[in-house]
Structure formats: C-alpha cells, structure tokens
Image: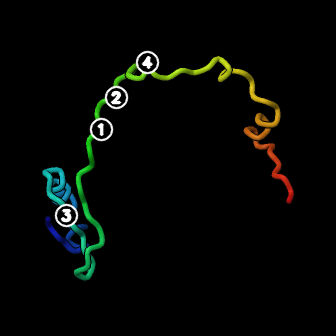
Amino acid sequence: MVTVNVHEAKTNLSRLLAQVEGGEEVVIARNGKPVAQLVACQRRSKRRPGTLKGKIAVPDSFFDPLPEDELRAWEGEYKTRER
C-alpha cells in the first residue's frame, strides 16, 4: 500500500491511477493522516439480453389504466391531507 499526501496525489494522479489499475492500493493523506483510499473498481460483466427470460412474469393488469386519484398524483395534482 502506497501513502501519498494531497499535493503529490494531485500532481501525480495519472501515475497513481496506473498503480491502482495494477492492483496497488493508494492512501491519500492530509497532514500525515489518512483521508481517502484509491482502490480499483470491480469490472462489470457484459450484459446479455434475455438472461431473465421466463423468470419474470408481468400480469396483464400491469397495463390497465391507473385509477383517477393515482393518475392525478403522477401528474402533480396530488394534494396532501391536512392533519
């Protein structure tokens, strides 16, 4: 693990990011006290269309019109109840 101060981190950000991509962890410190840690992001796997096919069921009622009061709420005409 590498520890650098804020000024060095700002000056050498590209180099530090290359180190992080290589698996190194970098700690950024202010006045010798650790403040942040740079670590590599986990790569997301490629999305594949159709992987949930047959696993999710949408009922036909999903496409029914909304009730009037809910429709008004979506259109911003919702009035809160007074207490």
| Residue named by callout 1 | 44
Q: Which residue is mark 2?
A: 47
Q: CA distance from mark 4 to mark 1?
A: 21 Å
Quadrant assignment, res 70:
top right
- The image shows residue 71 at horizontal and vertical percentages of 77, 34
Please tell me which residue lies in front, 58 or 12.
Answer: 58
Q: Are marks 3 and 1 in contact (CB under 8 Å)?
A: no
Three-letter code, disc 1: Arg
In space, the residues marked 4 and 2 are separated at their CA atoms by 14 Å
Kindly check if marks 1 and 2 are in contact, taking CB atoms under 8 A apart as contact: yes
Q: Which residue is mark 4?
A: 53
Name which of mark 4 and mark 2 comes first in the sequence: 2
What is the crowding at mark 1: few (fewer than 14 residues within 10 Å), some, or many (at least 20)?
A: few
Task: Judge whether 31 appears above or below 62 on screen.
Answer: below
The image's colour scheme reads rainbow
Tell me if 66 is positioned left or right of 38 in this view. Answer: right
Q: Quadrant of the N terminus?
A: bottom left
Q: Nearer the viewer, mark 4 or mark 2?
A: 4
Q: Secondary structure at mark 1?
A: loop
Q: CA distance from mark 4 to mark 3?
A: 42 Å
